[in-house]
Amino acid sequence: MIAPISGIIPVMLTPFDPEGRIDWGSLEALIEWYIAKGSEALFAVCQSSEMQHLSIEERVELARFTVQAAKGRLPVVASGHVAHGLDAQIAELRAIGETGIDGLVLVTNRLDPQRKGPDVFRANLERLLDALPADLPLGLYECPAPFRRLLSDDELKFCCDSGRFAVLKDVSCDLDVLLNRMALAEGSPLAIVNANAAIAWAALKAGAPGFCGIANNYHPDLYRWLAEHGRAHPTLSKDLGAFLTLASLSEAYGYPAVAKLYHQRLGTVKSIRSRAIDYDIRERHWALDEILDALTTGTEYFRMMIRGL
């Protein structure tokens, strides 16, 4: 039986060198940072990885490299599901599925790219299920690019009943929707993992099986502490949840380049080069380093508070 994939799951960045090529050395250092900071799985070749701007060869190699660097220490899932036509999707998904990953993540908007409705979604999903290895665990990702395509309750129930799916990265950003989905998935191998930082503490407190948001590129260890110990420390957890919500607003300042700037300051990656962001983030977003100073100071403050318990 397929085991759920859950916990604190970073949506991985793809470091590039100044010429725009994948910087494999920085990627290896970044993977080690994710693991050292308490990550419980890795989501490679996702939107944060700039998958829409990677060739199929780069997407495949990125997934393979991540598996090899992780060395079995935690599960690795990957998407790279960006093609428009179904035949091209099958080809790209089969190629990524052969890299040794622990789960292959389907993007919901690719299953209904022209927004024709649930019948088209279901027909395309069934064709993909027939085309992909039956023993390969699958995931679902309501990726907001090029548009957010949320699953209906009926679609989610079909995926649960299929027994093929191990994780949904929930992008509803709505606690009530998340909790309803968790109830629908109960008894199935599908873990409903929230992606939104604003509801992260409330979701974890309500029993959500993890967090898979962009903020795991800054402080995955703080989310893991909330998941494992937050209920026992309600006052600290309330304050930490408020800080994490405000810190997540850094996404508006040129993500994923701003997250790369954070890691460049840590020494994890060498360059903040991004294919998705084609402007100078410091020039457009004034006082950006001061914003990251505050984010860093807050992160270290709460790490100190946790160590002092």
Image: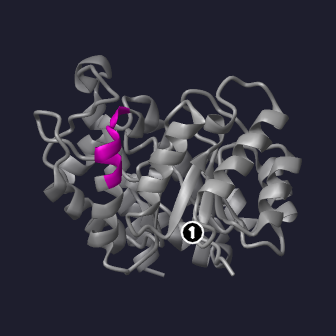
Query: Magenta span has 299?
Result: no
Q: Is 149 rendered above or below residue 267?
A: above
Q: What residue lies at 35% left-to-right and 33% top-to-bottom?
A: 53
Residue 267 is situated, as x and y percent measured from the top left of the image, at 15, 55
Residue 299 visible in the picture: yes
Q: Is residue 31 left or right of residue 161?
A: left
Residue 160: % across, % down: 79, 63
* Quadrant of the drawing holding the N terminus: bottom right
**Which stretch is magenta?**
53-60
Residue 50 location, quadrant: top left
Name the image quarter holding residue 257: top left
Residue 59 x/y as whole percent: 35, 47
Q: Nearer the viewer, residue 168 or 114?
A: 114
The residue that appears at 39% across and 29% down in the rendered structure is 253
Q: Residue at x 63, y 60 (%)?
A: 238
Q: Please, what secondary structure does the residue beneath circle 1 have? A: loop
57 part of magenta stretch: yes
Residue situated in front as seen by the camera: 40 or 89: 89
**For the residue carrying disc 1, how many other residues have a C-alpha within 10 Å: few (<14), some (14-19), or many (20+)?**
some
Q: Which residue is mark 1?
A: 136
At horizontal 42% and vertical 43% (from top left) the residue drawn is 48
136 lies left or right of 253: right
Disc 1 residue type (three-letter) = Leu
Q: Secondary structure of the magenta portion, mostly? A: helix
